[in-house]
Amino acid sequence: QVQLAESGGGSVQAGGSLRLSCAAYGYTSLHNCMGWFRQAPEKEREGVVAINYDGQTTYAESVKGRFTASKDNAENTLYLQMNSLKPEDTATYYCAAATVICRPPYIPSVSHFRYWGQGTQVTVSS
């Protein structure tokens, strides 16, 4: 059974940094796309970054230059380093594993991601 477990969320002031981690248990489709999504209250879930097996990434325009995704295939762990955080980054962040490979420069839609973590809250105050 596949389980994704995020950690590392919290509250920071604008301009601060946080690092999220996502441990993928039982996930063997390592060549499929993985990604980070976020959902703010009363808003749709949106893709933040997609990352493929060899670490190639596709970022949403809103986070380019501020967020960096990486993965450790040996440890089956996904990371998201978030710098220069803004209040509009406030959301619940989810890691996810897709049923398809990544296709840069696009982030696969939510419907292509089969496995989801429980989410971790990120709150950025001004």
Image (cartoon, helix red, strand yellow):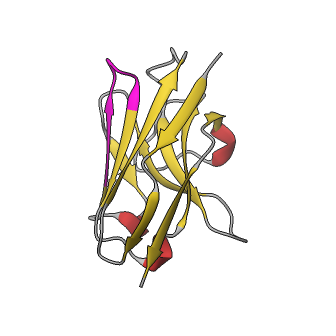
In the rendered image, the vertical position of residue 3 relative to residue 16, given as above or below: above
| Residue 23 on the magenta segment | no
Q: Nearer the viewer, residue 90 or 62?
A: 90
Q: Is residue 64 left or right of residue 118?
A: left
Residue at point 65%, 47% (across, down): 110
Locate residue 7, reporting x and y percent.
Answer: 46, 43
Image quarter (top left, top right, bottom left or bottom right) of the C terminus: bottom left
Q: Nearer the viewer, residue 59 or 116?
A: 116
Image quarter (top left, top right, bottom left or bottom right) of the N terminus: top right
Q: Main secondary structure of the magenta part?
A: strand
| Residue 73 on the magenta segment | yes
Residue at point 40%, 76% (across, down): 86
Magenta-colored span: 68-77
In the rendered image, the vertical position of residue 109 relative to residue 72, given as above or below: below
Please, which residue is most extreme toward the bottom here? 126
Q: Nearer the viewer, residue 85 or 49?
A: 85
Locate residue 56, reporting x and y percent.
Answer: 31, 39
Locate residue 2, reporting x and y percent.
Answer: 61, 21
